[in-house]
Amino acid sequence: MSIALAEWAPELEKYLIDDSKIPKDVVGPVFMKTELAIYAVEAIARDNPDTFVGILDRGLYVRVVGNRRLVLNSSTLVELAGRPVRFPGEVEVIMSAFAGKIRVTGERIEWYLEL
């Protein structure tokens, strides 16, 4: 059963894009629609003002779209979630896929392309 973005997280609708906006050098995670994913999308949008493009609603998943590089900082995620987040570990559980390469540390997750 698919969950509409408007029902799951209406606050993320401002980030919706269509497929025509996907950059050639796309990077980013695909998250299952969970509460933590809402905070992760907001954190990525906040921490990447120059490279965050938006999100695509894919039914049970949401694809985060960035151009060449996106970072999810643990400090921003914890602030938005209002609780401790196991990092790394908790985010990867809701990430079903990603575009680009990935680098995970105790402070951040980075999706990137080497060109």
Image (tube, grey):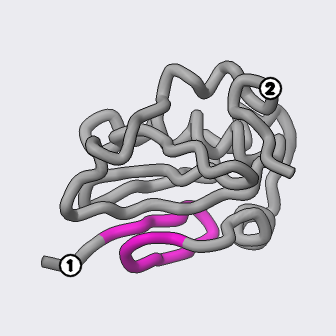
* Frontmost residue, 68 versus 90: 68
Picture residue at 30% right of the left edge, 50% below the top: 22
Query: What residue span does the magenta drawing correspond to?
Result: 98-112
The CA span between labels 2 and 1 is: 37 Å
Q: Residues within 10 Å of mark 2 (few under 14, many from 20)?
A: few
User: What amino acid is labelled 2 in the image?
Assistant: Glu
* On-image quarter of the C terminus: bottom left
User: What amino acid is labelled 1 in the image?
Assistant: Glu
For residue 27, which quarter of the picture?
bottom left
In the structure shown, which secondary structural element does the residue marked by tag 2 occupy? helix
Picture residue at 51% right of the left edge, 71% below the top: 98
Q: Which residue is mark 1?
A: 114
Q: Which residue is mark 2?
A: 7
* Frontmost residue, 40 versus 24: 24
Q: Find residue 68 and report its horizontal and vertical position in percent.
A: 25, 61
Magenta stretch: helix, strand or loop mostly? strand
Q: Hey, which residue is sitting farthest front in the picture?
A: 1
